[in-house]
Image (cartoon, rainbow, N blue to C red):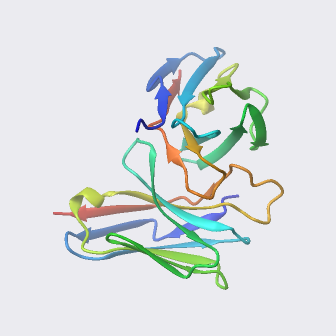
């Protein structure tokens, strides 16, 4: 079966711009989580969606937002980009929270210049 | 702060040797998971152990869990060069306010297996 697909794989943006990242979960998975990974902070939880509802949110500023569509695909948006937003953004999908483990996508490498 | 902490931060061994990584966490959990990440790529789920389990095996992987000490270990037997990666433990943080869909990761152990 197809895995979790994240697009694009790489992205270069300028400070102040906004960006939208996409995640297509494994078919049948209704939970989608997003993480930011940086060398300094490690893996940080952004938010989780289940059946189009945001159920949990990490400690990130309001510039970070997301949504989930009826087909479970999810997008995350970062507005007014800062240099510190440069990171690997990972999404993960699961059948049910935490019980079965998560399948991660290959990530989107965002570089802000 | 991070929930889990892996030890050691880096581990370098020869092919054929066993690799042991440890993880400590701070709060009660429902389960603990181990993931592998090859450089710059996504995480691959290796194994999940529930809080009422003490040991679990999957191929060359053996995971133990000691909830009284809030610690876990991952043993990779007969390591191969292809096992070179970062290994992360992750917990679901049972005691935290809202744990839905959220994993708490440690900083990871960088394992290098030399041919």
Residue B46, visible in the rendered structure: yes
**Image point (52%, 35%), residue name:** A27
Going by the picture, which residue comes out furthest to the bottom? B68
**Position of the N terminus of chain A by quadrant:** top left
Count of residue discs: 0
Please, is residue B76 above or below residue B109 in the view? below
Q: Give residue B42's position: percent from left, percent from top.
A: 45, 43
Compared across the picture, whether B14 is left or right of A14 comes to left
Quadrant of residue B8 within the rendered picture: bottom left
Going by the picture, which residue comes out furthest to the left? B115
Please, is residue B15 above or below residue A108 in the view? below
Please, is residue A41 above or below residue A25 in the view? below
Please, is residue A70 above or below residue B101 in the view? above
Compared across the picture, whether B31 is left or right of B80 comes to right
Residue A41, visible in the rendered structure: no
**Image point (25%, 56%), residue name:** B82
Going by the picture, which residue comes out furthest to the front? A28
Q: Give residue B5's position: percent from left, percent from top.
A: 58, 67
Quadrant of residue B30 within the rendered picture: bottom right
Nearest the viewer among B12 and B66 is: B66
Compared across the picture, whether A33 is left or right of A51 comes to left
**Image point (29%, 77%), residue name:** B18
Q: Give residue B69's position: percent from left, percent from top.
A: 64, 84
Compared across the picture, whether B49 is left or right of A9 comes to right
Q: Give residue A101's position: percent from left, percent from top.
A: 55, 55
């Amino acid at each position: 079966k197809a895995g979790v697909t994240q697009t694009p794989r790489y992205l270069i943006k300028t400070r102040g711009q906004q960006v939208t990242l996409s995640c297509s979960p494994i078919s049948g998975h209704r939970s989608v989580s997003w993480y930011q990974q940086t060398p300094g902070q490690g893996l940080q939880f952004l938010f989780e969606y289940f059946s189009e509802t945001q159920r949990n949110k990490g400690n990130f500023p309001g510039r970070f937002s997301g949504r989930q569509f009826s087909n479970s695909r999810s997008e995350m948006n970062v507005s007014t980009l800062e240099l510190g937003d440069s990171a690997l953004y990972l999404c993960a999908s699961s059948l049910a929270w935490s019980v079965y483990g998560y399948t991660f996508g290959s990530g989107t490498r965002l570089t802000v210049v | 702060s991070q929930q889990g902490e892996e030890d050691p931060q880096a581990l370098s061994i020869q092919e054929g040797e066993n690799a042991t990584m440890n993880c400590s966490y701070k709060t009660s959990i429902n389960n603990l998971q181990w993931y592998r990440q090859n450089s710059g790529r996504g995480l691959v789920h290796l194994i999940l152990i529930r809080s009422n389990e003490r040991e679990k095996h999957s191929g060359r992987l053996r995971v133990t869990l000691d909830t009284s000490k809030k610690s876990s270990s991952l043993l990779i037997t007969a390591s191969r060069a292809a096992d070179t990666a970062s290994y992360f433990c992750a917990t679901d943080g049972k005691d935290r306010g809202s744990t839905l869909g959220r994993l708490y990761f440690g900083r990871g152990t960088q394992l290098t297996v030399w041919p």
